[in-house]
Amino acid sequence: MPPKDSPKDYGPHTLESAQLISLPQLGSDGTIDWFAAPPADRVTNALTDDGPARAEGVGGTVLGKRKALGDIGMAGATKKRKTLGPPPPRPVDPNITSVAVMDVGQGNCNVLIEDDDTPVTYYDVGYPLPFFVSSLPANMRRNDPAYLGPYQPTSLNNMNVVLSHWDWDHWRLGHVANLQNLDWTYPNQPVGPATANFVNGLANGNVYPAAAPPGLGVNYAIIPCAPLPGMPPAAIMNNSGLALGTVTRIPSVVLPHPNLHVVMLTADANFNTLAGVVNPAAPAWPALVAVTAVHHGSNNYGAPDNLPAPAVPDGRIVYSYGVSGNTGNHPYGFPGNVAVGNYQAAAWGALPANARSTAEGPNIHPVGAGPLPPPPPLVRGNVRIGDQTPLPYANTAFTTFPVASRLT
Amino acid sequence: MASPISQPWTQLFHGVAAQGQAFADDPLADDGAYYAFLSKVDRDDSARTCDVLFEVVNKAWMDNAVFSRQLSVPRSLPSAPALLYHLPAVPTTELLAVLGLKTTDDLAEGSWYLITLSKGQREGLTAGDGGLVGDLFDPDIDSVRS
């Protein structure tokens, strides 16, 4: 669906009342009921039927409404739906020589780059909410004359997108930059009506089944995430999507196999929700050298806990977050001081040597650790892990990597 | 030679097509009632605030297009006149009170609510009186070129 010609801002509105219809809940067997009835002992405003249950069609009752939402409210229920089958035989694939964490303000967008300096895969294509657009660099603000945007599909139309989960700041660049014609792989999670409009417009959308084991792409592995027993409803969405792992070569790292340096990207999912991870200290993936901080460096719901151990004395870590260009504030308080401290304690990024951020380069200021500097950040930009050979693409905000933001 | 399409036939299906057009032209609800999908929640515990994004649809549209079906047939959601309602940095305790939740553990992305919005901000609102003010807008305001 193309953007409207004259989208409107209807201005301030007061939230007068709210009644909860459905609440995602995790069963004891690990299954997620996305449209469960709200527990009466925890919710005071649940929507109830007005008088005796009447059949005004399927959705006439509250129960009917939940059922109707369950039928049509999942990303996998969109018009063009293809559920992935067994992966094809793996071809001899070129190496991924670098992994980029793009500066998209308060959002997430990562790119895998092959050895011929070709970007091949997006992991997330995020964009901030309009309220936080000042956290974007000018060349990524759609309404700025300096806008360049991501790689242009006309020159790189074979890129694919692997989406971690359906949070707005992880997919919205797909709409802003018209990336609907790329091949998308995404988890089957509930989506709202605005997101559903976007999903319906995907030319080639592929649902990654929730119960499927990790699968192999050409240059990466998709690792499904599953909420852990006891995780509250508030943690389910972030921890029920897809993580992505790849192998590259980081020049300064010395490991037995020089071309087998694992980079793990989890977006907002905790490390111990990845399939096959029983003991994060001894993960199913050896040679782990670089990660992105869980949930932009969040302190909440176990995000900075149960961290894997790097295979090197000081693992590389990148924080993807935004800083308001107007106030210097950090949207949502990312990264949190507890998170940064936990990562450092787990040997991920002793500042400033091997930690980078999209918003502040190596000069990461965790929220809660003291006063924040005023805007604008002195160093910001796309972060690149691994090979730093310049990319031969013009007219894109995703081709330049400041020297201070490189991890080699 | 094919028979020309009859005028009543044409008028009938123009009428069918026009039923949804009113919602596309004006997605606002006259009575302020919307079905709201809790799309994004982020807590800033250092500030004791929450940032919340709802994807909302006019209740009347949803009742007609989604909830009035006579059969339970799995199908995709039709293109919806969706809006976004964003509550930036609102006090967590006040938000929980309005939503009827006892804990932030149940402030869950993926929840559906029936909400009522009124235009503007009424003076003197306090917690429990629905004193939270957010911005209601078309999602595509982020896609307008300069």
Image: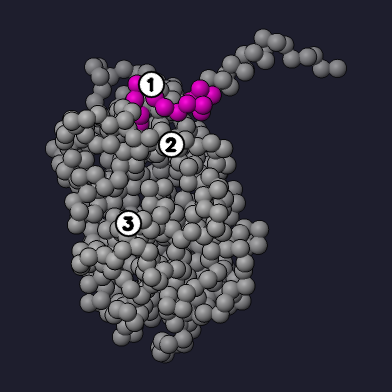
**Disc 3 secondary structure class:** loop
Answer with left or right where residue A408 lies relative to residue B98: right
Instruction: Return the residue found at the far top.
Output: B8
Q: Mark 1 Cα within 10 Å, few/some/many (few <14, many 20+)?
A: few
Residue A129, percent from left and from top: 40, 49
Q: Magenta span has A236?
A: no
Question: Looking at the image, which residue sits at the far right?
Answer: B1
Identified by mark 3, the residue type is Thr
Q: Can you tell which quarter of the image residue A295 is in?
A: bottom left
Among the 4 quarters of the image, the one containing residue A113: bottom right
Scheme of colours in the image: one colour
Residue A327 is marked as 3
- Dot 2 or dot 3: first in sequence order is 2
Marker disc for residue A158: none
For badge 1, the amino acid type reads: Asp
Residue A86: horizontal and vertical position, in percent? 51, 60
Q: Secondary structure at mark 2?
A: strand
Of A399 and A98, the residue lying toward us: A399
Which quarter of the figure is the N terminus of chain A placed in?
top right
Alpha carbons under labels 2 and 3: distance apart: 22 Å
Q: Residues within 10 Å of mark 2 (few under 14, many from 20)?
A: some
Q: Is residue A331 visible?
A: yes
Q: Which residue is mark 1?
A: B30
What chain letter is assigned to the residue under label 2? Answer: A
Picture residue at 55% right of the left edge, 58% below the top: A146
Q: Are marks 3 and 1 on the same chain?
A: no
Magenta range? B21-35
Q: Badge 2 is on which residue?
A: A9
Instruction: Identify which residue is drawn at 47% across, 74% down.
Output: A402
